[in-house]
Amino acid sequence: MANTNKQNLKTRIIILYIVYFAALLGGVIYNTAPAMKRGAKLGSEVNQILFESLGDDRLRVSQVFINVPLTVNRQIDLLQADDTRNTSISLAASRFDMLVSQDAENDTSFIDIIFRSVGGSAAVYISSIMLMLLNIAVFVLIFLIINSLRRSAGNDTPLSPKCVWYTRTIGLILIVIDFLNAWSEWTMAKGAAKFLEGSEYTVNTDFNLNYYTLLLAALVIFTAEIFSIGSKLGEEQKLTI
């Protein structure tokens, strides 16, 4: 009877872990999908401008600045056309995406144009690729954890030690993602501020971390320690039996 109760408790805990990591996966997708979608759209516009300029005398340099923050919300007033009720529309914008296109300098290479297409900096371009790879790594690790937990529940085996390392790795990756994303946004904001200098738009160039992501990373690392304790208890139980 005691063994049956322990088995039921263990199964319930593993199911809770599976639900937790499924929710974590959904949260990561929810946070990253919109930015990736906007970046892909702007990237296609950059490619179109670049390839259209290949037949011209001079190449065009196109730079994408994503999610640029404003110091003060910008109020935009619109008047609806063909409106018999005199409708006015006010928009408040706190962030924006910007696409800058200009003629390339004579000594600018095609590779240099590509690397400067994101935030006007090769470092930001490389960091955007790193962010994509890191997010993919999080997805893969979560799937591996869920699959390992599912096998443990089905085969009545202790939690795999790999789950501990996978979970710790996810927590550390989330911290790296947050700092790398904050640095990329900060660098792009400074680049956008140079283009908008003297205009009515004032860019916020503060370095801001996403504390929600840091809190999530801390929670994931805490979960890894719970995994570690559960795995050791499972091994001790096997040796006792």
Image: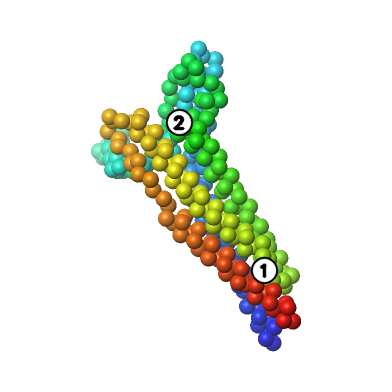
Q: Which residue is mark 2?
A: 120
Q: Quadrant of residue 164?
A: bottom right
Pick the front one: 163 or 103: 163
Q: Residue furthest bottom?
A: 1
Q: Can you say whether 45 is above or below 229 in the image?
A: above
Q: Is residue 69 visible?
A: yes
Neighbours of disc 1 within 10 Å: few (<14), some (14-19), many (20+): many
Expressed as whole percent of the image width and height from the top left, the position of residue 48 reads 52, 26
Neighbours of disc 2 within 10 Å: few (<14), some (14-19), many (20+): many
Which residue shows up at 63% across the image and 52% down it?
Answer: 140
Which residue shows up at 28% across the image and 29% down it?
Answer: 198
Expressed as whole percent of the image width and height from the top left, the position of residue 226 reads 57, 69
Which residue shows up at 48% across the image and 37% down it?
Answer: 124
Q: Residue furthest top?
A: 57
Q: Dot 1 lies on which element?
A: loop
Q: Is residue 89 visible?
A: no
- Report the side of 34 relative to 86 (left or right): right
Q: Dot 2 lies on which element?
A: loop
Sequence-wise first label, 2 or 1: 2
Q: Which quadrant is home to the C terminus?
A: bottom right
Q: Can you say whether 126 is above or below 108 in the image?
A: below
Q: Which quadrant is home to the N terminus?
A: bottom right
Q: Which residue is mark 1?
A: 159
**Label 1 amino acid?**
Leu
Expressed as whole percent of the image width and height from the top left, the position of residue 234 reads 67, 74
Whether pointer 2 and pointer 1 mark residues with C-beta atoms closer than 8 Å, the reply is no
